[in-house]
Structures are given as structure tokens and as C-alpha cells.
């Protein structure tokens, strides 16, 4: 999957998740969603060669999350062409440790991290009696792409 497709899929899945969260009124699910978005923003800034401008555990409300979805989508859509899967990115974590990872490794981390937290959010929603959205990639590929 290329960066543009990743950005399009994430924007689609995040928008669906946001709408469900607006109806659910579930603080823990909202917090998990904000964390997931913040991690995408942090990694996107690292890929762009910028210092991340947020923490990975922000206290964003859903309106801010909506703004972040737009910002994250634009960030990732503007990365293609600048990076290949083999490009190595050096970065410093929030705890001050310095590492280097390939773009391919970072994208796999984002993919798995997002899927994990969307599943966690689905569990919160289901356990509180809500309807869980289907944000699987294959649904995106069949209906949107």
C-alpha cells in the first residue's frame, strides 16, 4: 500500500469512527481515538522531518479530533515522492531515546497501531450497547477505491 492509499483509507476509517463516537458518548473510547490520531500525527511529522508538535496522549475533544483527521490526511498526502519504503528516518521518542527506522517499518507500525486501537474502540462501543462500524480495509477497497 502506498502513502496516498494509506492516507485515503485512514481518512475514511477515521471519519466513520468519529461519527460513531459522536453518538456513543464514551469517554474512554474518545480518549483512545485521540491517542490513535496523535500517534499518526507524531509519526507523520517524523516522516516529514519535523519535530512532533503534540503528545501521544492528548486530551482532545471530538471536534479537535475531526480537525486532526483533516490535518493528518493532508500531512500523509503530501509525503509521497519524498520517501521510499527503504528511506531511513531518524527520530527521538517522547522519552528522549533516539532511533532510526525505515519508512516501511513506520508504515507497518501505523497500520497495526491503528487497527489495534480501532478494535479497542469497537469493544468499548459494543460493550456499551452501541453499533460497531466496519472499518476493515477490504470494505474501503471494495466501496471507496
Image: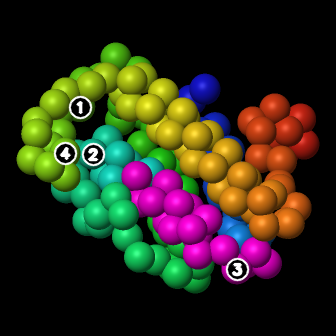
- Secondary structure beneath dot 4 equals loop
Q: How far apart are the two marked residues, 4 and 2, measured between alpha carbons?
A: 10 Å
Q: Name the residue under label 3.
A: 25
Determine the residue positioned at 55% across, 35% down: 111
What segment carries the magenta color?
Answer: 22-39
Q: How crowded is mark 4: few (under 14 residues within 10 Å), some or many (20 or more)?
A: few
Magenta span includes 116: no
Q: Mark 1 points at which residue?
A: 89
* Quarter-of-image position of residue 143: top right
Left-right relation of 115 to 101: right
CB under 8 Å between callouts 4 and 1?
Answer: no
CB under 8 Å between callouts 1 and 2?
Answer: yes
Mark whose residue sits in front, 3 or 2 = 3
Looking at the image, can residue 84 be seen? no
Q: Which mark is residue 58?
A: none
Determine the residue positioned at 89% across, 35% down: 142
CB under 8 Å between callouts 4 and 2?
Answer: no
Determine the residue positioned at 42% across, 23% down: 104
Q: Residue 46 carries which label?
A: 2
Q: How crowded is mark 3: few (under 14 residues within 10 Å), some or many (20 or more)?
A: few
Q: How far apart are the two marked residues, 3 and 4, measured between alpha carbons?
A: 32 Å
Mark whose residue sits in front, 4 or 1 = 4
* Quarter-of-image position of residue 65: bottom right
Q: Is residue 111 above or below residue 49?
A: above
Q: In the rendered image, which quarter contains the N terminus?
A: top right
- Secondary structure beneath dot 1 equals strand
Looking at the image, can residue 11 be seen? yes
Amino acid at each position: 500500500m502506498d502513502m496516498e492509499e494509506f492516507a485515503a483509507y485512514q481518512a475514511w476509517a477515521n471519519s466513520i469512527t468519529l461519527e460513531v463516537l459522536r453518538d456513543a458518548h464514551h469517554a474512554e473510547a474518545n480518549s483512545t481515538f485521540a491517542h490513535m490520531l496523535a500517534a499518526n500525527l507524531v509519526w507523520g511529522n517524523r516522516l516529514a522531518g519535523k519535530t512532533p508538535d503534540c503528545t501521544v496522549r492528548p486530551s482532545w475533544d471530538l471536534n479537535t479530533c475531526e480537525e486532526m483527521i483533516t490535518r493528518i490526511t493532508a500531512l500523509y498526502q503530501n509525503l509521497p515522492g519524498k520517501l521510499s519504503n527503504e528511506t531511513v528516518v531518524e527520530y527521538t521518542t517522547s522519552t528522549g531515546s533516539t532511533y532510526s527506522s525505515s519508512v516501511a517499518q513506520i508504515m507497518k507500525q501505523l497500520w497495526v497501531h491503528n487497527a489495534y486501537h480501532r478494535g479497542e474502540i469497537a469493544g468499548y462501543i459494543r460493550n456499551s450497547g452501541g453499533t460497531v462500524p466496519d472499518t476493515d480495509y477490504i470494505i474501503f477497497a471494495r466501496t471507496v477505491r
